Amino acid sequence: MSKRIKTDVLVVGAGMVGSALALGLVQRGLDVRIVDQRWPPLPEGEFDLRVVALSGQSIALLDRLGVWSQIAASRTAAYRRMHVIDGTSEAFIEFDAREYGWPQLGVIVENQRIAALLAERLGVQRLDDGLSEIDGTRCTLASGDRVDAQLVIAADGAASPLRERLLIDSDGRSYAQSALVAHVRCERPRSGLAWQRFLDGGPLALLPLPDGRASMVWSVPIERATRLMAATGTEVERALATASGRQFGAIALTTPLAQFPLRWHVARTFATENVVLVGDAAHTVHPLAGQGVNLGFADVDCLLAYADRALKTGRRMPSPGELLRYSRERRSETMLAARAFDALNGLYAAGGPWVALRSAGLSAVNRIAPLKRKFAQIAAGVRSAAS
Ligand SMILES: Cc1cc2nc3c(=O)[nH]c(=O)nc-3n(C[C@H](O)[C@H](O)[C@H](O)COP(=O)(O)OP(=O)(O)OC[C@H]3O[C@@H](n4cnc5c(N)ncnc54)[C@H](O)[C@@H]3O)c2cc1C
C-alpha cells in the first residue's frame, strides 16, 4: 500500500548539491526527506572518472556541515599552483598559493566521494525512490508514495525533470563542444599543479590525482570528439601529446574516454512560491573554470543563510519573499559567471587580432601583482577578507 509522508522540506536529487542542502537543513532541526533512485556508494579501487576542483568556499561549507575532514582523509589531491597557457602564443599566467600565504588553491575530489559521504550522514531522511509528479507541493513518487512538503527543492541535475515540469525556461545555449574525460599518466608529471592550455577547439586541463596520475578534461568540437571516441588509444595519446605542447612528455590513457556534451544554461527563475532550484538544476557552466559545483555549493550557502534568518525570527521556513531574494541573488551571480566563461571560451576559439590582444592581457595580469591576486582569489574561491 502506498504511504503518505508529511514533511517540512522534500529535496529531489541526492547529488553533491542536494545532499549538502538536505544535511544543512536537518542540522537546523527541520524535518527533511531526500529522494533519489541512485544513491552513490563510496568509491573504492579505481578513481571515479568524475572529479571536481573544490574552491575554498566550498571546502568551508563542507567543513561547517561536518564532513570535510572525512572527505579529505583519503583519495584527494590539493593543488598549490595553477598554470594557464594560450596554446597559440604560449603567453601564460601562473598562480602559486604560497605567494598569498594560502595552504592551497583548491582540492581535487571524486564527485561520488563527496555525494556518498554526505548521504551517509542522512538517515531516515533518505527515500530510495524518484519523483514522478508534482502538484503545488504535493509530490507523487515512482513507487506511488505521496509526500506533502511545505518546500520542494529541485536538485535533480542539469536535465532537471522538475524544472521542466514547472515550465521554467532557461537562458543559455549548447556549445558545439564535448568534454572528453579520462585519467592519464604523464611521462613527466608535475605534482600539485592544475594546468590548462587553451586551444582554438577548446581548453585541455590536467588536474592532479592523489596517485600521481592526472584527470584530463579536454573540450573539443563535437565532430572531433566523435572521431577521438572512435580512435585507438595510441591515436588519442598522440593527439594529447600535441595538444599539451609536449609539456608532460608522453601521456598514456589509463581509463577509457568518457564524453560529456557541453552547454550553459541559467534558469529564468530559481524559485517559485514553494519550489527552489539549486545546483545544476538551476545552472550549468562551461567546465573551463571548474566552477559548476562550486556555484551549486554557493546556492546551498545562500539558502542556509535564509533558513538561519527564518529560524532566528521564530519561523521554520524562509518566506516566499526571501526565496525570491535567493533567486535574484544567485541568478545574477551565476549569470555573470556563465557569461564570463562563455566569453572566455569564445575568445580562445577566435584567431587573428584576438590572439595578440588576449596574450597581452594574460601577460599583463601575470605581471601586475594586485590584479593577479584578484584573479587568484576568484580561481581559488577565497573571500577577500580571509586572504
Ligand atoms: C567534464 C566536467 C568537469 C567538471 N569539473 C568541475 C570542476 O572541476 N569543479 C566544479 O565545481 N564543477 C565541475 N563540473 C560541474 C559539476 O560536475 C556539476 O556542477 C555537479 O556534478 C552538479 O551536481 P548536482 O548535485 O547539482 O547535480 P547531479 O550530480 O546531476 O545530481 C542530480 C541528482 O538528481 C537525481 N534525479 C534526477 N531526476 C530525479 C527524479 N525525478 N527523482 C529523484 N532524483 C532525481 C539524479 O539521480 C542525481 O543523483 C564539471 C562538469 C563536467 C561535465
Image (spheres, rainbow, N blue to C red):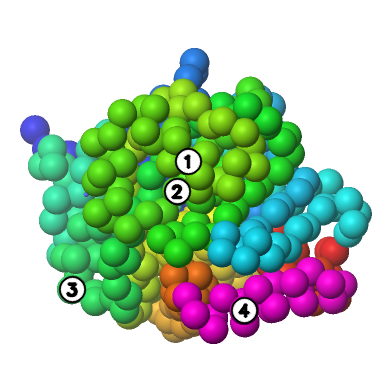
Residue carrying label 1: 240
At label 4, the amino acid type is: Ala
At label 2, the amino acid type is: Trp
For label 4, count other residues whose C-alpha is less than 10 Å away and answer few (under 14), some (14-19) or many (20+).
some
Q: Is residue 124 magenta?
A: no
Cα separation, mark 1 vs mark 2, equals 9 Å
For label 2, count other residues whose C-alpha is less than 10 Å away and answer few (under 14), some (14-19) or many (20+).
many
Prevailing SS of the magenta stretch: helix
**Picture quarter with the N terminus:** top left
Residue carrying label 2: 218
Q: Is residue 102 above or below residue 86?
A: above
> Of the residues tagged 3 and 2, which is closer to the observer?
2
> Of the residues tagged 1 and 2, which is closer to the observer?
1
For label 1, count other residues whose C-alpha is less than 10 Å away and answer few (under 14), some (14-19) or many (20+).
some
Cα separation, mark 3 vs mark 1, equals 42 Å
For the residues bearing labels 1 and 2, Cβ distance under 8 angstroms:
yes
* Occupied quadrant, residue 236: top left
Q: Position of residue 228 (x, y in %)?
A: 31, 41
Q: Secondary structure at mark 3?
A: loop
Q: Is disc 2's CB within 8 Å of ligand 1?
A: no
Q: Is residue 357 magenta?
A: yes
Residue carrying label 4: 356
Residue carrying label 3: 167
Task: Specify the segment rendered in magenta.
Answer: 351-369
Q: Secondary structure at mark 4?
A: helix
For the residues bearing labels 3 and 2, Cβ distance under 8 angstroms:
no
At label 1, the amino acid type is: Leu
